[in-house]
Image: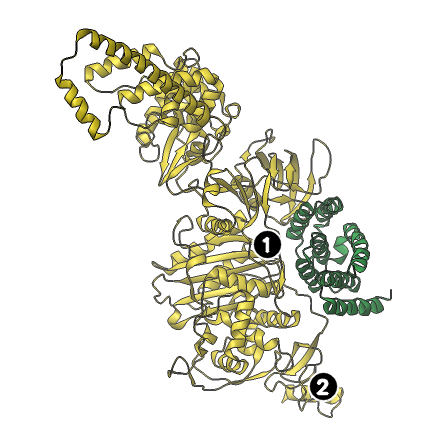
């Protein structure tokens, strides 16, 4: 039960994340240029509705197609991490969130990734690791000023 | 029935010696006749059972179909007009003005009109669409559906079929529907093989009578007189021997088949069953596969001449084989055309034109089992983990792979053209991977990419030479408190004990010692001696750990010579190792399969993208920077002949003793390639990594659309000026200083004299002074 509360809160936050990404993935794309954005946005939109409907496999397939088109778009990797979290594949969720972080220098995106990592670690019973990830979240919160 | 156990035979022999009475004999006859009738009825029942059971449902074992990755079209996609056309041709799209039907396209300059085919993917279906797009400096622009006047964000074309997975000695076929086959093909077939097809009930008594007469005259079975139904029965249910018993069976079963099924069903089964060619161990059945095998296109696109050629071959597939006996095949085709005209299937004009055309047979190989045997081999091994061989060869599964036809063709061309230049006996292999998702886009297993045999990309395990060095340097750079890119290494004579009691003195390739060299220089120039010293300082087990973490195979025995690459790996294993570097320290299992569906399109299994963090991002960032220096100013600098410096590719050359193996592994922002060149029996090649494998890599990458490699620096990375020959902290103005990335807090402690107690102006002044001295 101890794990439930933060996880539930996080899922709510992550729902927002997935939705937010579809709005402007190209802005956060790191080194990836924007031209593929229309196609990518289409796929992220479909992934979002599939994931919301619980069809995570489908969502994952859409996101992987998007990653194939824009492989260095950190937001796509974050979204895939969210989908893995919803699939309860927590190790993959963490790895993908890490990967997303490695592709981006944007604090807000990194903060969301660390929040996801914290939740994934907690779900696996790694309280210490979760706390370390939470520290990253706090630090980034201070940096971004929210 | 006739045969019994030996004891019974003895008794019957005894019985024949007795003389039975006439009445008794009649009684026996009567009983025997009745019994025979019962047996016959039973036998007919048995045949009927076979027909209804074997002919229902899955009539044929269908090998799994293997598809390339589908091409996704969207505004901004980078592809050249010619590459797009290559892709469409790989899909068997016909170039036709107006692109009126699905599976066709038209091109005017850089503008394409494409009529896509509908396709059921594992994650949903794509409708058939008519789209228009333009290519502007190799980028797709203005993607539209002109008829609906909408701009679709994304169009996924149907995937190219690249092969099948079928057993070694078996039948292969592509099923066709009667309605999809050109009507003239069906009408022609009936005209030539069985023109009373729609009138008879499975057998044609007139034809049988005629054939029987001929047989009696000859004293053996010489004539068929078979209807299409009988031919189908013979091929489908019976052996090929020409005995009367078989003929009787065939006739009975033909009648039964006609009782159960209508003419259209029988015709469709015939179209798919008929044997039309032999391709090594593979028997080509049905018009669907035969038209691909001989003409490289689907049956629905066959022209009249091609249809007639195939119809003619029914009579004797090897005798009339157009590849081995073109003149004979042409005569036969013309005879078929004549027959078709006489039966009113075509008119005189059609006959004349078709007879005048060439046979149109494509060279063998293009449509053989697969064009990409090495890649299919990888796919099979991948699938064998999850599927029984039997299911792969009989269930008609659809396998969606990651092969990119244009990348595959590019790397094949680069490898074979270089090997041809380097002479006989030279072999090679190559693997291409998409960096971020680990999808294998191409595999070449040897000099002849069509040869379905020894797959060097997967099975040739060869010493990797200096390709191991990034593993050693990564081990060092993962300890930022001890090592940085500017750390000074000793390059002076060294002798160590290698395997039990054997002394070993590693040499540099140029046979010279360079004194003190910076770590990044030692990597860039691939100096052996400082690398061995570094590896020994780190400890061999630590290096082995890194090798394994990267995804490589550990050596069986750990000796110091391992530090110079006495570690055999296959090109695929090297690709896995370098993929971990290219992806920023994440182990991404290389994938050749995205998904598997049933024959009806229902998804069976997906192979999702998976990543596994293997290294701290700073160490991998630093080694990547070091490997970029290899290309900028080290052993791979001649790559600039092939690709622009703005790509910032990272790579490593590898050469083993006496130039027995030539390796190159390198990556850009989006693509990784590994090339090996050598001889099967381990002879000398006279090629280094740079003059051999790297040239193949360079040519390949020069033809591909590349993303530059600009890795995002981890937060803790800071740029630091370091004096090159001392490794001491310097500043921007210092002579002999280079700017290198360092993990914050681990920059060199010791300050170079150039910044000791002096101000910036002094430094600048001294720098200017030295410049003019």
Q: Residue furthest right?
A: A146
Q: Compute the Cα span from label 1 to label 2.
A: 43 Å
Q: In the rendered view, how is the structure colored?
A: by chain
The answer for which chain carries disc 1 is B
Q: Position of residue B511 (x, y in %)?
A: 42, 81
The chain letter of the green chain reads A
The answer for which chain carries disc 2 is B
Q: Which residue is mark 1?
A: B705
Q: Is residue B135 left or right of residue B538?
A: right
The image's mark for residue B764 is: 2
Which residue is more in the foreground, B386 or B30? B30
Which residue is more in the foreground, B735 or B23? B23
Of the two numbered discs 1 and 2 on the same chain, state the one appearing first in sequence. 1
Q: Secondary structure at mark 2?
A: helix
The image's mark for residue B265 is: none
Q: Is residue B366 left or right of residue A8?
A: left
Which residue is more in the foreground, B302 or B436? B436
Q: Secondary structure at mark 1?
A: loop
């Amino acid at each position: 039960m101890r794990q439930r509360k933060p996880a539930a809160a996080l899922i709510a936050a992550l729902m927002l994340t997935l939705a937010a990404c579809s709005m402007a993935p190209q802005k956060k794309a790191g080194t990836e240029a924007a031209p593929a954005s229309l196609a990518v946005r289409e796929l992220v939109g479909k992934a979002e509705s599939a994931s919301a409907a619980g069809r995570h496999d489908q969502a994952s397939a859409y996101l992987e197609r998007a990653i194939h088109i824009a492989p260095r778009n950190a937001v796509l990797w974050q979204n895939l991490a969210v989908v893995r979290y919803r699939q309860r594949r927590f190790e993959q969720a963490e790895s993908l969130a890490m990967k997303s972080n490695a592709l981006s220098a944007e604090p807000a995106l990194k903060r969301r990734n660390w929040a996801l990592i914290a939740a994934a670690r907690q779900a696996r019973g790694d309280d210490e690791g979760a706390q370390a990830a939470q520290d990253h979240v706090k630090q980034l919160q201070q940096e971004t000023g929210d | 029935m006739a045969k019994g156990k030996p004891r019974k035979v003895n008794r019957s022999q005894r019985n024949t010696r007795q003389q039975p009475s006439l009445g008794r004999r009649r009684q026996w006859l009567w009983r025997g006749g009745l019994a025979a009738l019962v047996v016959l009825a039973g036998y007919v029942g048995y045949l009927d059972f076979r027909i209804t059971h074997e002919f229902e449902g899955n009539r044929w074992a269908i090998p799994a179909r293997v598809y390339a990755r589908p091409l996704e079209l969207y505004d901004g996609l980078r592809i050249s007009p010619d590459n797009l056309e290559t892709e469409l041709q790989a899909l068997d799209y016909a170039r036709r003005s107006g692109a009126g039907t699905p599976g066709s396209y038209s091109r005017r300059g850089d503008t394409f009109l494409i009529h896509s085919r509908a396709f059921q993917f594992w994650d949903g279906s794509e409708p058939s669409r008519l789209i228009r797009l333009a290519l502007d400096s190799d980028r797709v622009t203005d993607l539209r559906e002109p008829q609906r006047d909408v701009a679709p964000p994304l169009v996924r074309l149907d995937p190219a079929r690249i092969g099948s997975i079928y057993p070694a000695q078996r039948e292969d076929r592509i099923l066709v529907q009667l309605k999809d086959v050109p009507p003239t093909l069906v009408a022609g077939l009936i005209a030539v093989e069985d023109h009373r097809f729609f009138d008879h009930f499975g057998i044609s008594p007139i034809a049988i009578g005629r054939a029987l007469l001929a047989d009696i005259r000859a004293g053996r079975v010489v004539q068929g007189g078979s209807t299409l139904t009988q031919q189908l029965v013979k091929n489908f249910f019976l052996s090929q021997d020409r005995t009367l018993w078989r003929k009787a069976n065939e006739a009975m079963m033909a009648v039964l088949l006609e009782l159960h099924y209508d003419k259209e069903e029988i015709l469709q089964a015939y179209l798919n069953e008929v044997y039309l060619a032999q391709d090594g161990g593979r028997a080509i059945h049905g018009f669907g596969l035969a038209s691909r095998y001989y003409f490289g296109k689907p049956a629905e696109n066959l022209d009249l001449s091609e249809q007639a050629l195939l119809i003619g071959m029914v009579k004797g597939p090897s005798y009339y084989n157009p590849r081995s006996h073109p003149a004979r095949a042409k005569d036969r085709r013309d005879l078929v055309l004549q027959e078709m005209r006489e039966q009113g299937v075509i008119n005189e004009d059609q006959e004349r034109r078709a007879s005048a055309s060439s046979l149109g047979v494509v060279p063998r190989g293009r449509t053989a089992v697969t064009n990409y045997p090495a890649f299919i081999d990888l796919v099979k091994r991948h699938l064998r983990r999850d599927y029984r061989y039997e299911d792969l060869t009989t269930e008609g599964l659809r396998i969606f792979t990651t092969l990119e036809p244009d990348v595959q063709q590019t790397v094949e061309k680069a490898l074979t053209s270089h090997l041809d230049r380097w002479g006989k006996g030279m072999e090679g292999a190559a693997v291409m991977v998409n960096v971020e998702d680990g999808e294998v886009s191409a595999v070449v297993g040897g000099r002849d990419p069509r040869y379905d045999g020894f797959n060097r990309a997967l099975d040739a395990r060869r010493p990797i030479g200096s390709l191991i060095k990034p593993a050693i340097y990564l081990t060092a750079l993962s300890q930022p408190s001890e090592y940085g890119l500017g750390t000074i290494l000793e390059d002076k004579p060294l002798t160590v004990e290698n395997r039990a009691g054997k002394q070993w003195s590693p040499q540099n390739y140029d046979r010279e010692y360079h004194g003190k060299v910076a770590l990044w220089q030692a990597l860039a120039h691939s100096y052996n001696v400082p690398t061995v010293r570094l590896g020994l300082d780190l400890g061999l087990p630590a290096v082995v750990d890194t090798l394994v973490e990267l995804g490589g195979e550990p050596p069986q025995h750990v000796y110091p010579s391992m530090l110079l690459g006495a570690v055999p790996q296959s090109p695929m294993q090297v690709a896995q190792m370098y993929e971990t570097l290219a992806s920023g320290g994440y182990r991404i299992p290389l994938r050749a399969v995205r998904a598997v569906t049933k024959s009806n399109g229902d998804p069976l299994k997906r192979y999702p993208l998976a990543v596994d963090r293997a290294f701290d991002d700073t160490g991998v960032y630093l080694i990547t920077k070091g490997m970029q220096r290899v290309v900028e100013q080290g052993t791979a600098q001649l790559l600039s002949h092939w690709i622009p410096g703005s790509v910032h590719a990272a790579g490593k050359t590898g050469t083993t003793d006496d130039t027995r193996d030539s390796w190159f592994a390198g990556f850009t922002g989006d693509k990784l390639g590994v090339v090996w060149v050598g001889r099967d029996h381990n002879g000398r090649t006279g090629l280094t990594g740079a003059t051999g494998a790297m040239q193949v890599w360079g040519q390949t990458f020069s033809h591909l659309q590349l993303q530059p490699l600009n890795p995002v620096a981890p937060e803790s990375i800071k740029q630091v000026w370091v004096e090159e020959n001392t490794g001491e902290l310097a500043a921007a103005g210092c002579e002999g200083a280079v700017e290198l990335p360092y993990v914050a807090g681990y920059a060199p402690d010791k300050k170079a004299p150039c910044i000791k107690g002096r101000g910036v102006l002094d430094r600048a002044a001294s720098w200017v002074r030295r410049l003019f001295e």
